[in-house]
Image (cartoon, rainbow, N blue to C red):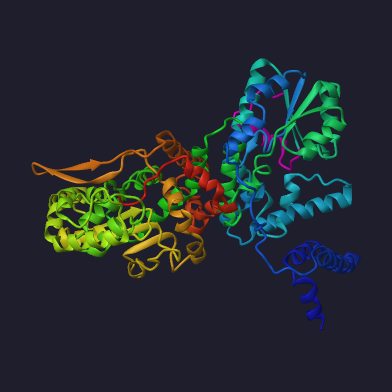
Amino acid sequence: MRLAVYNFLVNRHPGIRQKYHNYHDRAHGYKNILSWIYLILLNVICFFTIGHYPKQVNASNSGKHKKLPLTESESMVRFRQGKSVDDVVSELMKYDIVSFDIFDTLIFRPFSAPTDLFYLMGNEIGLLDFKRIREDAEYTARIEKYTEFGTYEVNFRDIWLKLSEMIDISVDDGMALEHKYELEFCYANPFMKKVFDKLIKSGKRVVITSDMYLSKAFLEELLHGNGYTGFERLYVSCEYDKSKSDGRLYDVVLSEMQIAPEQMIHVGDNEHSDVKIPKRRGISSCYYPNVNKHSIDYRANEISSIIGGAYRGIVNNHIYNGISGYSREYEYGYIYGGIFAMGYCCFIHDYVRKNCIDKVLFLSRDGDILKQVYEKLFPNEAVEYAYWSRKAATKLMANGNRYDFFRRFLYHKVNQKITVKKIFDSMELADMLAECHEVNGNDYLTNDNAAVIKGFLVSNWERVLRHYENEHKAAKLYYGKLIGDSKKIAVIDIGWAGSGAMSLRYLFEKEWDINCEVIGVIAGTNTVHNAEADASDSFLQSGELVSYLYSFAHNRNLMKQHDLNKDYNVYWELLLSSPTPQFMGFSMDDGKYGFRFGRLDANQSGIMEIQKGILDFVEQYQCHFGNAENEKFSYMYNISGSDAYAPMLVAAEHDECYLKMINSLFDLQVNVN
């Protein structure tokens, strides 16, 4: 009976369970009785505020995110609404002394929450749930300090004394380890670094004022290591048992610096301790919006905890620090393409290493930026950029797959106001049009005349194939030279049926007699929204084709959400767009192969901005977590397909209005021409 009551009151709702245990598990004596009263109140409040006990949900899922800006980028909104470096410096120069907060003002961490650092520490220590244990130790230390001395201010040793009672690690070793991690990951906020340097150069008196458990000596080392030198004094709450949040640390600063409140201004990101409290003391404040707090509604939360924290932290620190405003195209690459391209390349590398791949071929044009990212991550591997396209594959596969030839060149284009002449030109069979007497070159392609054209071409099929003979010879020479003596290659493409890689596999084996196994690696497959949803299932099942983001075998929820009828394929291909011309096919001249190219896509500068955004994200991620192969944090590059897709799910909210806006800036050509 008692267990049934407990389950009813505690376990019916995850929020109640968490709040109850946070209180009860630390309770002693009469507080055990109070914890039951607290539990009953939680149930009453829950029932009467929402009318029922909700089903358990992911705590991170708070529904739709805030609608993304459409007319300008996130960073431009922040840049326009905020103050420039020179504006801030001008304001601060009016005062005799400038005080700075440290964390999230002068110093950033590459995480969206400071406690995310403890995940990585726990990995080195080798203990499950270390992050929670570390948080609990600090909480307990603060409660005990308040109970005995009436203040919540604790120092670093207080926390680790409590933590050493919970886990088998000495206080000194634990403190040294956490110090090492703080020094490794903390870095200067580029906006505030410029402000700080200008003030110091001008001779302005600067002090640092922080609510923190870390010692003054360590914080000085941290600040100096990140280029912050020349300040007069450093005031830390744990050294005085007085905090900014209660105002008493500001009193210490005023007293020791022997100044009146109106002579000082404080700069910080906390609206309470850095703005409201100093103002109550008569001290002016300069509010610096917290980069994570003010962008959280735009960032993916349905993403694994560690990768998600790093992704959000790096993105928010870069986009919202206020030093610059970026283009919408740049942010599309940086925010949505960076983690995808990096995760996909790491997936490719892992596959290559485990499956003894001799060479990696990145197919044009989606492979352009992927190859750049791959070489940045793994500079010593054998990779090539390979010219290939849907159109080239469709022509060269005409003998092996006549069905697909007619589907792509004819039936995918009926009733789209494309003339018959353009269809014959696209197939590179213009000289045969005059012999197809039942159609007029100026007529639009319809279902009826498509059938007529198909019948004509089938009856003259040997002539059709002869049109592509030289292209076959050129392509065979090109790929033979490209792969060299490789016996097993991985062919990389965006997707979606995997026709690029599978057509090469067929041609190598059946028509070109190239003795090399071809494995196709694609970002994503066809989905339930495709007419040919299972087109590549046999190859996926056999392992001749592998997919990163999703397939029928994994991340099926993404496969259901990825809807080509809402242009999802286009949005993803836009992320991998290239400022290079369309590849139309191969040519053969005097025994040498050549290439034929089409037009460039519109908005070349925008495409280059997307690529720059992707490369900047990868470079910054490497800066924080080291080499993807050899460093101790290489596990930070284990980015799952679902994590890589998560930011795009945010972009697709609100009826894809953000993605439609981005697409409107371009004229991406994705079909067979």
**Would residue 60 be seen by someone viewing this image from the given angle?**
yes
Residue 545 rendering spot, x and y as whole percentages: 34, 63
Residue 338 rendering spot, x and y as whole percentages: 48, 45
Asked if residue 238 lies left or right of residue 366, the reply is right
**What residue do we see at 50% from left, 55% from top?**
645
**What residue do we see at 81% from left, 28% from top?**
253
Q: Is residue 298 above or below residue 104?
A: below
Q: Which residues are magenta?
A: 211-232
Q: Depth check: 21 or 83 in front?
A: 83
Choose top left, top right, bottom left or bottom right for residue 64. Answer: bottom right
Determine the residue located farthest toward the top in the rendered image: 202
- Residue 221 drawn in magenta: yes
Determine the residue located farthest toward the bottom in the rendered image: 1
Q: Depth check: 272 or 96 in front?
A: 272
**What residue do we see at 71% from left, 51% from top?**
160
Asked if residue 364 lies left or right of residue 103, the reply is left
Residue 489 rendering spot, x and y as whole percentages: 27, 56
Residue 120 rendering spot, x and y as whole percentages: 58, 52
Q: Depth check: 483 or 325 in front?
A: 325
